[in-house]
Image: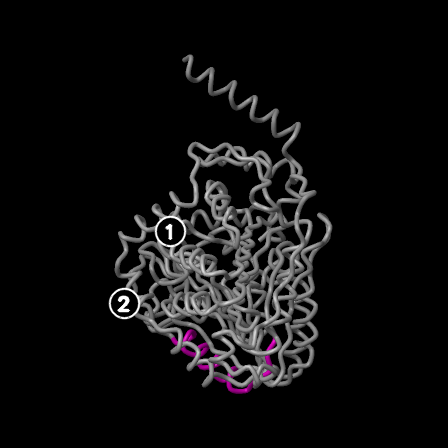
Amino acid sequence: MGAVRISRYFLVIAWLFLLTSCPYAPSSEHKVYTHSLLPGSGSRIASHMGSGEYHDASALLIEDPGFALRSRIDLINASDISIDVQYFIWQNDPTGILVIEKLLQAADRGVRVRALVDDLQMQGLVSRLSVLHAHPNIDIRIFNPFSMRMRFPLELFRVAEFAIDGNRLNHRMHNKLLVADNQLAILGGRNIGDDYFGFSQQRNFIDTDILLFGNIVEKLSSGFDSYWNSRWAYPVDEMAQIAMRKDDLQMLRKRIDLRLSDYPQLVAMINDFSFDHTFDMLHEGFEILEAATVIDDPSVRWFDRPDEIAAELTKIATNVQREVLIVSPYFVPTANMFEIAKILINRGVKISVVTNSLASNDMVIAHSAYARYRESIIAAGVDLYEMRGDPLFAENDIAEDISLHSKYIIFDDDIVFIGSMNLDPRSLYLNTELGVVLRSPDLANALRSSFYTLIHPDNCWKVSSTGAGLSWTSSAGTLDEEPAESNWQQIRSLLYRMLPVSNQL
């Protein structure tokens, strides 16, 4: 009984602490403003790509999860000047630790490393990042941090702070970007972690990235700078925390080595791969005729909605003549989307959308918001597909669950958008996002081929209206209720549909 009473007192004190001092971001009066470094003509990347061809643009499509990891490691290993990384999620697992090790090795050889990570899923990792931040060539910042920090998980505090200061904390940085020597960049849907690189036994996210070379990389670096120097980015060493154990850099190196020694297959896969191969593939990649970045402004006020990408995609969509192919793992259409779809379909444009089924969705609450609109989507004339929970192309996958995570749109025969944005209100108006619009008939054709592989009946359900409801058809047959992993998953989805939170998903 005494322990219960002490726990109650502790929670009351913590709650009062939150009320009096925590619902506001910490000050960052001593933050140093830095900017991307100029690409060097004598760097290894320049020697591989040809410094005289820097104005030419090319792209390499990255769909294989193993290559997605290797290509990031290749860029880090090849860098001589600078590495800038920006991610929504950085998991504390073997691949996440491996990437940290490679960044640490790059810093040891004199490369400037800047890492910006969103704080939503950083619970318990800040003290370790503070150790890395102590390296003279590593600078780490956290985007829109929570005020209460602890090494051990205590979600109650975060829930309480979110309830008090939700308008600020709802503004998350969903961007994913890695820039090497201001000459090469990888962006797309993948975060850093086992789930995104095919190394997890729990879940594999089917995803799409792109490796870019050309003048557009400097524009991406400029976009990174705008986030890095914004009021939302806080140096990790300024953030208060209660740590159970203090590390130093030498101890952290030993812990990294010890952790990775348990995964020799992962380490061997990286060590056996030469970055020359990645650059050779990029040389033979897709020619980009025109390229533009679409990057949300990070410096919006708490009640503003960053919508730069939404506005840009609306402008492109209104000029489409033949076809729009959309891949979005979380799909919650807005009134503006329905209006655009109506205009395009009325003039003969075919619109096809692929998203997750309930069985493949890792976010049941997001699926429930989408499910409210399914009949309206089909009634509007959109061809709607949902990825199966057992897609054939992933039949040899080690993961228990497979989820779609790619985010791209193909407009007609030559325009492609690829980036971090889902087509839902959260991505459009609450989170910040990053992407590129590329004009490349060859790239569009390659992504179109991937799209049609994805919607094959062995991989996807075609969702149709029967008049009396909906049906799902694939090579597995036809269902009159949506495919799910379990009855409990279906019940959860039905319960979530009663919540009025579609604009938050």
Measure the C-alpha gap from mark 1 to mark 2.
22 Å
- Magenta includes 476? no
Depth check: 124 or 180 in front? 180
Q: Position of residue 285 (x, y in %)?
A: 47, 83
Majority secondary structure of magenta residues: helix
Instruction: State the quadrant of the N terminus.
Output: top left
Secondary element type, mark 1: loop
The mark nearer the N terminus, 1 or 2, is: 1
Q: Is residue 22 visible?
A: yes
Number of marks drawn: 2
Depth check: 286 or 356 in front? 286
Q: Is residue 146 left or right of residue 400?
A: right
Question: What amino acid type should be assigned to the residue bearing mark 1?
Answer: Asp
Residue, disc 1: 93
Residue at far top of view: 2
- Position above or below: 50 against 219: below
Circle 1 packing at 10 Å, graded few (<14), some (14-19), many (20+), is some
Depth check: 421 or 96 in front? 96
Residue, disc 2: 396
Q: Position of residue 143 (x, y in %)?
A: 60, 50
Q: Residue 294 falls in which quadrant of the image? A: bottom right
- Magenta includes 454? yes
Q: Position of residue 449 (x, y in %)?
A: 44, 81
Residue at the (61%, 26%) spot, across then down? 17
Q: Which residues are magenta?
A: 437-456
Q: Residue 430 falls in which quadrant of the image? A: bottom right
